Image: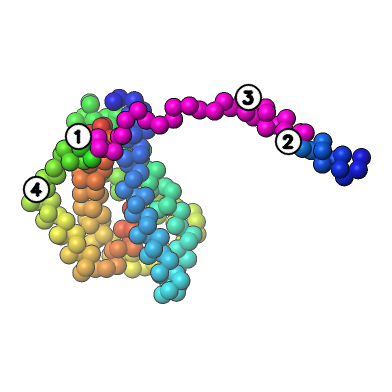
Amino acid sequence: MNKHLYLRAYLAGIAVPTLMLLVIMAGYAVLRYAVHFPVPIERVIVFPMAVVPNLWGLWNIAFIASHEKLRQSIGIHGMILPFFLAPLGLLAASLLDFSVPHFVFSVLPIAAPVALAAYYLAWKYLVHGLNAVLGIA
Amino acid sequence: MNERDHNRSEERELEQMRKLLKSALPALSDTEPHRDLWPQMLRRLEQAPVRVPWWDWALLAGAIVAICAFPGVLPALLFHL
């Protein structure tokens, strides 16, 4: 079953953040329309909606392509992704004229290790599980 | 050209278009898989039981505690997930 290896890797990669979108969109709808949160999130919602899932897919392709040579752990491989995503997110926010609320910067020392742990666990268990189901682990 | 002629020529054109489309895209036969793939999928899902080492539980617990203690990290996390 070695057909379309990278297509399967891409699909396994995008599955987890795509499911997370349900949570993000629900949170967005509650914040904007129920709580009337005064931050225009819709300006930057394109980042978690489009950029993040695609990068997860491409990152999983990179894992599958390099695993034969490097034999790296998928958890560690996934943990490296936030180092690209975080600056990209900030860049997208600034390009889209979205001023990041101040509290985001104040919680950064806590958010960064939590994000690394979340990515490590998500890649080790969820993406790896999907890779195994699709026969590419 | 009156309206009746116009309608008739339109119908003729549509009929011609229908024939052309049908000849260009022949009907597919045998579109169903030869066997039911779902049992195989279930077997594969059951094949590899997940063993979680204690340090991963500790990592998960630490992340949950940090989120509960500082709920402000949640929007920043969701933005990047």
Q: CA distance from mark 3 to mark 2?
A: 14 Å
Can residue A68 be seen at all in this image of the molecule? yes
Residue B13 within the segment the image draws in magenta:
yes
Q: CA distance from mark 2 to mark 4?
A: 66 Å
- Look at the image and tell me in which quarter the C terminus of chain A lies: top left
- Look at the image and tell me in which quarter the N terminus of chain A lies: top left
Q: Which mark is residue A72?
A: 1
Are there few (<14), some (14-19), or many (20+) residues within 10 Å of tag 2?
few
Give the quarter of the image for residue B15. Answer: top right
Q: Nearer the viewer, residue B48 or A70?
A: B48
List the residue tagged with mark 4: B53
Q: Identify the chain of the residue marked 4, using the numbered disc in the image.
A: B
Q: Which mark is residue B14?
A: 2
Residue at horizontal 26%, vertical 59%?
Answer: A111
Residue A81 within the segment the image draws in magenta:
no
Q: Residue furthest left?
A: B54
Q: Amino acid at mark 2?
A: Leu
Are there few (<14), some (14-19), or many (20+) residues within 10 Å of tag 4?
few
Give the quarter of the image for residue B64. Answer: bottom left
List the residue tagged with mark 3: B23
Q: Amino acid at mark 3?
A: Ser
